[in-house]
Image: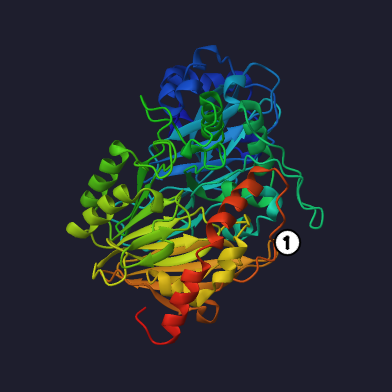
Amino acid sequence: MTSRGPSTRPAGAGAATGRRRLAVSRRELIAASGGALLAGAALTTPAHARLIAGARGISPGAFLDGVASGEPAPDAVTLWGRIASERPRAAARLIVAADPELTRVVATALVPTSAGVDHTLKARIGGLEPDTRYWYAWQSRDALSPIGRTRTAPAPDSARAVTVGFSSCQRYGDGFFNAHRDAAARDDLDLYAFLGDYTYEYEDAGDAEIGRGPDPASTDLGSYRAKLRLYRADPHLRELHRLHPVVHVWDDHEVADNYSDGDPAPSAQQRTAGYRASFEWMPRLSVPGDRMRLFRAWRLGRHAELFMLDERQYRTPGEPGSTMLGRRQLDWLKAGLSASQASWKLVGNPVMMALLGFNGPGGGLSFNRDQWDGYTGERDELLAHIGAGPIADVAFLTGDIHMYFANELPVDSKPGSGSPVVATEYVGGSVTSTGIPSWLEGLGNAAIRAINPQIRYLQGAEHGWAVLRASADELRVDYRASDIRVAGAPLTTIASFAQARGSNRITQVTGGERSMTLGEDRAARAAVTGSALAARRGRFAAFGSAPRTVAARAARATARGGRR
């Protein structure tokens, strides 16, 4: 339920100070909420809404896991919290204000929760002004949460440039979340997109040298929830959530490494547990009638629309697979791209779209068929649809592969095909996750470029995040990185790219001296024998050992002046 406007503020609002405003009694709170109680069903997830009839008021309990906001629209935002309670059912009051001191309250809500949703709290507050900052807090009977800050999306006709951050792959034990510290400190972010591998299911003893860890394994609902509590305890991730609205899609590690290939497949119970915990801990609401749906579009003014994709839930098992997105999601994306009036159509894409492998006139041999290289039918259909429109200025924002790339995407990637470039792709590295296969380092930059001409930039030894600015004439993308072995290490921009409207071409404007750099990942650690990570690296090594000769030949041909 929400109350809006001076006439419906809690009793004693008036000219009272912020401190007095929050010190309302239980009776005053319920009286102020009063007849709007049933309206709360529209503001919560179905799991929360079922509890409303049993919520009698505010419960005692602390807020130990921070606050978060997400899903910004021009007139609404979703707010998240969690109350620590031993009670099976509890409730907290949400306060939304137009100032950091919470004196100009614009909305309140009495939000119920229970152990069934891990005592998480969610409400979607509507009736807000576009492109406007708001502050919020959760109140229990004896505690107040940290005060969060959020921002509504610009109106669809807003002509101002918008800024979006994105990242993926933040394995806890591999290093410090310096990228999140850097992003949290920015004042210009309209939205932050997590593109998968927000948590890792691996058991990890941590890195004793830097004092990070341990990180226990997660295989069931209780351990997935514990994993999320551990990650959210990181001060930099928590601060990013407190200060900026976010959207999130999962990749594989929120459940299990490459689980969608079916080799072996986790149980249905484990998969559901991973999905459920993710929904509980993110500031998002379920789509009515489609509880686990993630794919959604978010309009950010005149110049950007972000389409977030779910590239795990609808895959067909096996390798190679035939379905990455599934027919319903693929048709939704194609229709959305065709209909979008935004200057830039941004696609939140958990796994890499561009071919990465041994790319010759007769076809390609991929390094990693868990990405789009294993689902070429859907990739070809999607890129052909973009090209046939033609749909201008589509850029994929990508995670998963633990490296930075900038790629140009033709419909047909084979050298000499003459296929036009129809879209671009920016792969934003990893926050901490390491693991460039040593054989890939050994190929060298010349070989990579020779057999993958669609790759315009590659940096594999750094970790951080990416930030883009979308304006009427240009898309600007910066890659930022730091030494993740040092807590709080400052970030620098290692490369910047400019893409002119209508060009589908990437121009690197800074960081050229570090273009196409592989080299040793200084933060890499040996995988524990018998672990899932060790098995994965073993598969890569087995695949990569034989084709080095092909790459060497391609590199020599390039050195002799052969075609790129």
Picture coordinates of residue 417 (x, y %)? 25, 68
**Is residue 233 or residue 171 the one in the foreground?**
171
Residue in view at x 29 percent, y 52 percent: 156
Q: Quadrant of the C terminus?
A: bottom left
Is residue 179 visible from the viewing direction of this image? yes
Asked whether, in this view, residue 291 is left or right of residue 140, the answer is left
**Is residue 86 or residue 274 the one in the foreground?**
274
* Count of numbered marks: 1
For residue 333, above or below residue 219: below
Residue in view at x 70 percent, y 26 percent: 61
Q: Name, please, the residue furthest toward the top.
A: 54
What residue is pinned by disc 1?
485
Residue in view at x 34 percent, y 80 percent: 563
Picture coordinates of residue 424 (x, y %)? 35, 64
Asked whether, in this view, residue 296 is left or right of residue 548, the answer is left
Picture coordinates of residue 151 (x, y %)? 46, 49
Is residue 103 visible from the viewing direction of this image? no
For residue 96, above or below residue 36: below
Picture coordinates of residue 248 (x, y %)? 48, 44
Q: Secondary structure at mark 1?
A: loop
For residue 67, above or below residue 512: above
Q: Name, please, the residue furthest toward the bottom.
A: 560
**Is residue 142 or residue 262 the one in the foreground?**
262
Residue in view at x 65 percent, y 69 percent: 520
**Which kind of residue does numbered mark 1 sit on?**
Arg
